[in-house]
Image: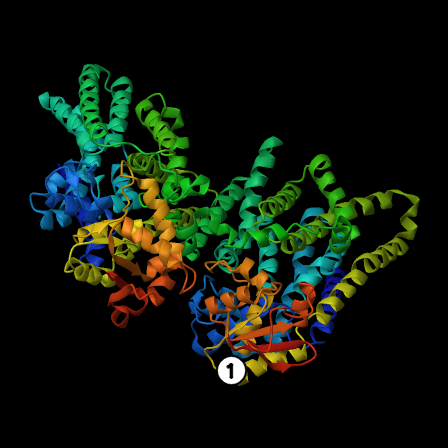
Amino acid sequence: MKKQQYTKYYVSALIIACILVLSIVPLLRLDNSFSGTEAYLHLRMAENEGMFDELSYGGRFALYSLGLPSILSLNPDLLGYVLPLVLGVLSFLLFLGLLKEFNIETKSLAAIILILSPSFLGLFTTLNKLIIPIFLTLFGFYLIFRKSRLHLLAIPVFAIMPFFNIVISLMSLFLAFLLVNFKLKNKRWLFYILLPITIITTSLFLGYIFKNTTFERLMFEIGKSGINGKLQDIFSEMGGRYGLSIFASILAIFGMINNWKNKYKELFIFFSVFSLIILMMFRIEAIILLNFFIAVFAAKGFKAFLNARWESKNLRFFILLTFICGIVFASMAQGSRIVNSLPNEAINDALKFLDNLPDGTVFSHYSRGFWISYAGKSNVMDDNFMFAPNVNERWKDSQELFYTRDWKIAKGIIDKYNIKYVWIDNYLQEEIWEGDDEGLLFLLEYSNSLKKIYDNKDVYIEQAVQIWKVQEE
Amino acid sequence: MKKDYIILFAIFIVVFQFRLLFAFQTPYLSADDAYYNLRHTEHIMQTFSPIIFDQLSYGGRYIIDSHLFHYFLAFLKLILPMSFVFKMLPELLFASLVFIIYGIAKRITENSTAALFAAFISGFIPIFISNSLNNLSQYALLFPLLFYQLYCMLNLKTHMGRFILLAFILPLLHPFSFILSIAMVLYSILLNLEGMKVVKMQRESILFYILIGILINLILYKRAFFSSGLLAVWQSIPTNLLVQYFTNINVLALVYNIGFIPLILGILGILIGLFKEKQKPVYLLSAMILGNFILLFLKLISIQVGMMFLGILLALISALSIEKLISYLNMTKFVKYKQHLFFLGVILIVLTMVIPSYFNAKNIIDNSISFQEVEALNWIKDNTHENSTVLASIEEGNYITSIAKRKNVADKQFMLAPNRYSEMQEMFITESQVKALQFIDKYGVDFIYLSERTKKERSIEHLKYVDKKCFHMVFKNEKTTIYKVLC
């Protein structure tokens, strides 16, 4: 009885910790804006009915995850803030439930490591397309474990998952396959229902996409590439948005080594981990799923360190302290990155100004595309390259416009895309150009056909945004 | 025993005196990097806080440095005179290596004569002298501490506290300290390959040293890792410069610079330690050499630093060969000439190590920043607006910020700095005035500082694009010319 009560308190404390961590990070963003760019796309789509997005790439088929905007459309302003937190806490509870099902001894420790993991923090502190599918994955697995007829509910959960994220849906299906083959052998029949249903919904969704769009292979490289790029995706400390903590990963390796003797008992976990390690080389979604397993093994590793026979107690203390500091550091670094990420006040003010301007296409770097369309203006390019119309041509033209000093060339591109405004901010300036009068900056400065209509340099100095208007000749 | 300590102390005095003799031949410091350290130390002395955003370097950029060395110097400056802290202290620290080398060599060989020879050799590695003399460098503190950590590692039972303390200090001091982590991993692998076991306490200490090293480096260089990932370990050194690390390597020059004796005796020592005696400390030292080569191969360290480290390691391992030679000598009839042979050994060291060290030291002092150069830099400080930007070669960038107190276009602190290396190189050799003016316009250059040193390094006689219309010569002495940009 006493133990039960103790467990109850412990779980409550963990839930409170989870709520605190997930709510503090967004609250620290003083301007109440969402971190990054993706949230702005979903919020706009929540208010935009229909399958045609007229603001992205000058008009395109709205190939986005259908589920999230549909849910957000109920109350975009409120759900935009609340949904990540609610789903984060629910996912955390489901994770605790799953740990119980797997009889993990170190569940409290695993839960703490999960709360502090940069991947979990990055996922559930801002609105993004992965929050619902990850929640659904955990929910689906939790349902599969149910002994009553509740496990049948896993079927609709897996069935709707492709509408939120096809990749996670397929990965979850694969993990479900491992689960019924290595752990819940008596529920193989359930997998035989999940498999065709998930494939049917995935095919339907994909079919709908291919019917309405044409696929164009990207001829340019974006983001990180090569081994270093992969490492940057995988580890949070190297810059990965959903990356793993290096120290939790080291602990997890020790945990796995320590548990190697139980590999036949925990075949599902070991197979899942190895599969996800391979998959994470190709898709970042696998990193998020792997993070849950990392939390489990890191907890086991920590316990193994704690209980091992040490020659030097001092070293034991310092090693464990280093691990704790490493995990906390990764979490804090991730938190601080989310808090300090763009858009900042200067950009928000500029977006408000842009919102009030007459309609027209705005030219900027693709990374500003979602913000521009959130302000109700059409962009030339945004982050959503997949199935975008003439994406390679638009990329080439954008690059040319960034670096040309020849007004004739620039004018040609401006006319081609009917560009009315140009958005330049200081961060962009640092990223794209080296000097103050390189390429487009030179034209903006010296061409009479471009007029500065907004500049918040006086207020924000180093974070300033400028909006230029193309004068009609 | 007491006699050994007296000899050891005498060796230290000789090495220290040798260094001081040259260091005080010039009132200035020899390397451009030294002025980076000097400037940061002076800033800490004045404000008690480090420069985080440097307004002068690259015209304004963030500095990523733990500043531990600068705080160390600033603290000493509170209680000691300036000439001691900036001129004598680095020499004292570098010379103190002989004590540590003696300690490690004695631990490996248990022969004080061999250890004394190793200590003597380590004090006169020519390439070490070249790169450390009259140089206010972090390596002055790093090298002795790194080797002392090695000593602690070999004596963990008695030196555990110091090992833990140094495990915190070393990564804070310089990223090069990570070489010990690499060496420790290689050491474990080598021992495993030989079917030997790493002692449990050593295993624990290796794990701790590696983990704390990773953590501190991740915290210190967070910004760099975030933006560049693993590439941050190359400290944003321009590719062109990395390529240069290994060009013009002359094997004979390397032998001359490391020293013939440590090279032969060191290699012999490795062979004896690894294959005959199977001594664990030699495995550790070999792992350090291997680690050094790995860092060199990956171009993570410059050839100069790599060779400095290699020289000291070889001098250290030489003790094993010397000990074997002494043992062998004791078994032969030559034993009665032991004293003479020792004397011959000393003569050999003097001929092959001390004399090359003398010439290297002389060369370093001769090529130090001259009075005329300092005069020109002071002219800039006194006669230009404090917001002026001065173009100087990348190797003289820190002179501009430290002595002239003006903005430079680029210097050798590459971490998180914009890559201007190629442009900078071209700026001194281009014939095109259009190109030069574009560059000048781009970086807002107001003055050009052209020294004889720059001319010599780039094999030029003057800047070909300079004419009277766009450039006005505002200062000239034997070794420098300063132009004001008019266009």
Q: Position of residue A34 (x, y in %)?
A: 20, 53
The amino acid beneath tag 1 is Thr
Q: Nearer the viewer, residue A418 or B187?
A: A418
Where is residue A307 shown, x and y percent of the image?
Answer: 38, 38
Instruction: State the colouring used for the structure image.
Output: rainbow
Q: Residue at x 31, y 43 (%)?
A: A242
- Placement of the C terminus of chain A among the 4 image quadrants: bottom left
**Of the pair A91 and B440, the residue shown nearer to us:** B440
Query: Which chain is indicated by disc 1?
Result: B
Which sits in the foreground, A223 or A304?
A223
Q: Is residue B106 above or below residue A123?
A: below
**Residue B96 horizontal side relative to residue A240, left or right:** right
Residue B29: x %, y % from top left: 63, 72
Neighbourhood count class around disc 1 (C-alpha, 10 Å): few under 14, some 14–19, many 20 upward: some
User: What element does badge 1 sit on?
Assistant: loop
Seen in the image, is A430 located left or right of residue B401?
left
* Residue under pointer 1: B384
Picture residue at 44% right of the left edge, 70% below the top: B50
